[in-house]
Amino acid sequence: MAINLEKGQRINLEKSNGSKLQNICVGVNWGAIEKKGFFGTKKEAVDLDASCAVYDDKKNHIDSVNFRKLISNDRAIKHSGDDLTGDLNGDDGLDNEVITLDFSQLTPSANHVAFFINSFRGQDFKDIPFASIRIYEGTPTKVSQEFARFDIANDATFAGNVSMVLGVFYKRNEEWKFSAVGVPTSDKKLEQTIVTIQQNHL
């Protein structure tokens, strides 16, 4: 059974049989904004960009994967590609963007791998009806086993924010763990979010 994560929770990447997760998918799912007008409700497509950034043990940024760069330099991290709309017809249970991560192929200097989303069109997070991140084994098109899920509901405290730090994988004593962050930021560009993570979330 998948772990339902809460903000600030930290977990080991250990399965029920005691083995460690090595090849994982991090899927991000989100919905379209509903706007009520004189002639009824209208759906507005939402373009969120899922990204990840890699840092060393000194918190230096050493690599990134996003819609402009789909594969990391060490080829351990791969992005499924840019989704421009979100779920226009409600939550279909599928991820809009998926980033795969093979811990065994990561450059040895990697100590943190942070996942975050940016609203490309500047759409406010408080208006997006749902967004979630889940960690699972499988491929971008097939889930073998869901390990953990972190749901980020629309929240009035998100008002004015167009980027969010979802979570950070971090290495301790040569073992990888995960910290659910779920904190919005006021950054307008993903380059700014990379710096915010570097300063506040590692």
Image (cartoon, grey):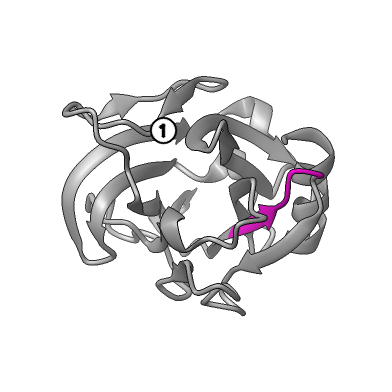
The tally of labels here is 1
* Residue at image location 39% in from the left, 61% down from the top: 98
Up-down relation of residue 131 to residue 88 (above or below): above
Tell me, yes or no, if residue 115 can be seen here: yes
* Residue at image location 41% in from the left, 27% down from the top: 12
Q: Amino acid at mark 1?
A: Phe
Mark 1 element type: strand
* Residue at image location 29% in from the left, 65% down from the top: 140
Quarter-of-image position of residue 183: top right
Q: Tell me which segment is drawn in magenta.
A: 52-58
Residue at label 1? 150
- Dot 1 crowding, Cα within 10 Å, few <14, some 14–19, many 20+: many
Give x and y (percent) for residue 71: 52, 76
Is residue 140 found inside the magenta-colored segment of the image? no
Front in this rendered view, residue 193 or 154: 193
> Quick one: quadrant of the N terminus?
top left
Left or right, 122 with respect to 72, comes to right
Front in this rendered view, residue 99 or 42: 99
> Quick one: quadrant of the C terminus?
top right
Up-down relation of residue 40 to residue 44 (above or below): above
Front in this rendered view, residue 174 or 200: 174
Give x and y (percent) for residue 3: 30, 25
Give x and y (percent) for residue 156: 62, 27
Left or right, 22 with respect to 108, comes to left
Front in this rendered view, residue 178 or 20: 20
